[in-house]
Amino acid sequence: EPEVTQTPSHQVTQMGQEVILRCVPISNHLYFYWYRQILGQKVEFLVSFYNNEISEKSEIFDDQFSVERPDGSNFTLKIRSTKLEDSAMYFCASRGTGMNTEAFFGQGTRLTVV
Amino acid sequence: AQTVTQSQPEMSVQEAETVTLSCTYDTSESNYYLFWYKQPPSRQMILVIRQEAYKQQNATENRFSVNFQKAAKSFSLKISDSQLGDTAMYFCAFMKRTGNQFYFGTGTSLTVIP
C-alpha cells in the first residue's frame, strides 16, 4: 500500500538553528500539507501546497517557515530559526484530487528544540 | 471560519462493547466532507471513516459507523465490538468541498479495557 514517508523520525536542535523536515508524498498525489501537533494538543494546519505553490497557510506559518518541492518527489518544511515553542510533532500529508479526498499522513517527525 | 468540537477528551469502553464518540462542527458551507482519523500510540494518523455532506446515508466501515445529522452539525462515531487495537486518539475533521485544508477537533482519547 502506498504511504507517505517522513524523515527524520526525531530531530533535536538548538534554539536559533535551522531545521529541514522531509517528506516523500504518495507519487500521484497533487496536494501536500504540513500539520503540527504540540504534545497533548490538537492537530494544527500549517500550510497546503498545490501546483508548486502555497495554496493556503495558517497564521502559525510565518516568515520563519517555508516549504519546497525541490525535485518533484520530496516535500520539505524549513524552519529558519527555531524557537522553543516550535517543539512539536510535524505531520506531512498528501492527497489526490476530485472525489478522492482521503489524506494520507506520514508517521510524523518529532522536533525537539532545546 | 470552520470549527470542530470534540467535547469528550477521554473515554473508555470494555472490550466487545459499543462506544460513541461525539463531534460537532460549525460552518456556513453546504458542501463538505467529514472524517474520523485514528492516531494510535505509533502516532501515525489513519483514516477511519469519511462522510460526504451531500449524502444522507450514514457511512459505515465494518465495525465503525457514523451518525451524521447535518441540520444539527453533528457527526458522531460509533465503534461496535470494541477491540484492544481500537485504543487510540480519535480526531474528527472537516474539509470544505471546494477547499483543501482539514480542520481538526481536539481529539478524544479512547481506551479499550480488556
Image (cartoon, coloured by chain):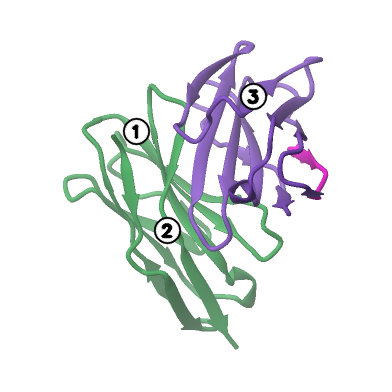
Chain colours: A purple, B green
> Can you tell which quarter of the image residue B43 is in?
bottom right
Residue B17 visible in the displayed image: no
Q: CA distance from mark 2 to mark 3?
A: 39 Å
Residue picked out by circle 3 = A66
Q: Nearer the viewer, residue B31 or A25?
A: A25
Label 2 residue SS: strand
Residue B4 percent location from the top left of the image: 34, 49
Q: Secondary structure at mark 3?
A: strand
Task: Using the image, tell me which numbered label, if any, was put on residue B32.
Answer: 1
Relative to B1, A68 lies left or right: right
Chain letter, disc 1 residue = B
- Counting residues from the start of the chain, the first of labels 2 and 1 encountered is 1
**Residue B96 quadrant:** top left
Q: Please give left or right for residue B24 compared with residue A12 in the image.
A: left
Tag on residue B65?
Answer: 2
Q: Is residue A55 magenta?
A: no
Farthest residue, direction bottom: B114
Q: Residue at x 64, y 24 (%)?
A: A66
- Closer to the camera in the image, A108 or A97: A108
The stretch of residues the image draws in magenta is A1-11
The amino acid type of the residue labelled 1 equals: Tyr
Q: Which quadrant of the figure contains the N terminus of chain B? A: top left
Mark 2 belongs to chain? B
B13 or A65: which is nearer to us? A65
Are the residues under marks 2 and 1 on the same chain? yes
Q: Which subunit holds the residue at mark 3?
A: A
* Amino acid identity at mark 3: Ser
Amino acid under disc 2: Ser
Asked if A54 appears above or below A93 in the picture, the reply is above
**Of all residues shown, which one is farthest toward the left?**
B71
